[in-house]
């Protein structure tokens, strides 16, 4: 399968292009067509793209026969003794307790190849950055800290006020998100001044997710929820297992709480299909495609409205 050539309509775009590893055959065909069209780069034509997707889809059908049930054979190992102190620190982390407070969650070493994937792309620069940080022969401790980090994120983000009641927040990280709105007491904010005395503070929390490499386990299948670039990078380095927070659910209704909406909407496919997409598919030349795309930033816009009125006490 030939990767799309990096043909730039304008040489000035060179610094604005990045490569994306895209899974063909299982994700909807239209998603792939939209990706190439919206990239604004080399478009070999819809027929060729459809032919490529069809060949990958045929290959998946062959895998459904030759690898039926492979996702039910996940190998999971206990953490080695030297990682136990690190695991205790992760479990004591407030972000971990907040993220995994609904269902039983264990820290274990999971087999990368048999992780089910619902996200059908990874971005090369993110992977390259992870591998550069780890080096060619990372220690078990370095791998653990990469997969299950404690402390805040050092990912750059930008915040700007663009109107009296309009704010923009942006980052290149795909994990950048609106977290929640909270009511705070004035004493919770340092160096806070106002036109008069302050009774309450409304906070809009913008940032990143808990950032733990984690999977949802339902029966014998594990769906990778977060940490796609790290899992890909470790697999590319030749590792077979990675530290992972595994959240176990026992009923289909619990998936709505633990899993992403994509997985919830197609639960029968991910947990019952004879051969769903797996992390190892990203390394199968018959299934993966390298596609040049324009670099993008995730942007969050926050606006607010204030109304004052009287009502009965």
Image (cartoon, grey):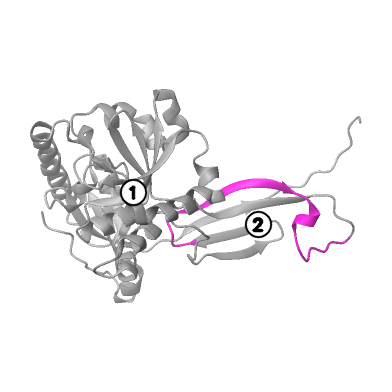
Vertical arrangement, residue 207 with respect to residue 120, above or below:
below
The image quadrant where one finds the N terminus is bottom left
| Among the 4 quarters of the image, the one containing residue 65 | top left
Residue 175 lies in the magenta stretch:
yes
Residue 99 point in image, percent of width and height: 51, 43
Q: Residue at x 39, y 25 (%)?
A: 250
* Magenta extent: 171-195
Verify whether residue 176 appears in magenta: yes
Q: Can residue 199 be seen by looking at this rendering?
A: yes
Residue at image location 25% in from the left, 26% down from the top: 272
Which residue was labeled with disc 2? 166
Q: Left or right? Give the position of 281 relative to 80.
A: left
SS at mark 2 in the image: strand
Tell me where residue 186 appears, x and y as whole percent. 80, 55
- Front residue of 81/227: it is 81
Q: Residue sitting at 38 percent across and 59 percent down? A: 146
Which quarter shows the C terminus?
A: top right
Q: CA distance from mark 1 to mark 2?
A: 47 Å
């Amino acid at each position: 399968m030939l990767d799309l050539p990096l043909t730039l309509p304008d040489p000035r775009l060179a610094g604005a292009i990045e490569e994306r590893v895209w899974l063909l055959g299982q994700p909807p065909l239209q998603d792939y067509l939209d990706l190439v069209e919206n990239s604004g780069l080399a478009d070999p034509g819809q027929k060729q793209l459809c032919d490529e997707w069809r060949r990958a889809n045929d290959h998946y059908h062959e895998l459904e026969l030759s690898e039926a049930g492979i996702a039910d054979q996940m190998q999971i190992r206990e953490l080695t003794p030297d990682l136990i102190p690190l695991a205790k620190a992760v479990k004591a982390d407030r972000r971990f307790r907040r993220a995994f407070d609904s269902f039983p969650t264990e820290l274990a070493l999971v087999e990368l190849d048999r992780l089910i994937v619902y996200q059908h792309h990874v971005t090369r620069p993110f992977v390259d950055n992870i591998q550069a940080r780890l080096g060619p022969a990372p220690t078990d401790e370095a791998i653990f800290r990469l997969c299950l980090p404690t402390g805040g994120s050092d990912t750059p983000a930008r915040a700007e006020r663009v109107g009296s009641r309009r704010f923009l927040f942006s980052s290149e990280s795909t994990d950048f998100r609106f977290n929640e709105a909270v009511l705070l007491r004035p004493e919770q904010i340092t160096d806070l001044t106002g036109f008069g005395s302050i009774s309450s503070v409304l906070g809009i929390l913008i940032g990143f997710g808990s950032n733990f490499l984690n999977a949802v386990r339902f029966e014998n299948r594990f769906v990778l929820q977060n940490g796609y670039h790290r899992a890909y990078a470790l697999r590319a380095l030749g590792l077979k297992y990675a530290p992972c927070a595994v959240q176990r659910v026992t009923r289909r209704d619990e998936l709505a709480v633990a899993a992403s909406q994509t997985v919830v909407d197609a639960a029968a496919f991910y947990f019952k299909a004879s051969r769903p997409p797996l992390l190892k598919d990203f390394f199968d030349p018959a299934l993966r495609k390298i596609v040049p795309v324009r670099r993008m930033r995730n942007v969050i816009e926050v606006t607010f409205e204030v109304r004052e009125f009287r009502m009965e006490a």
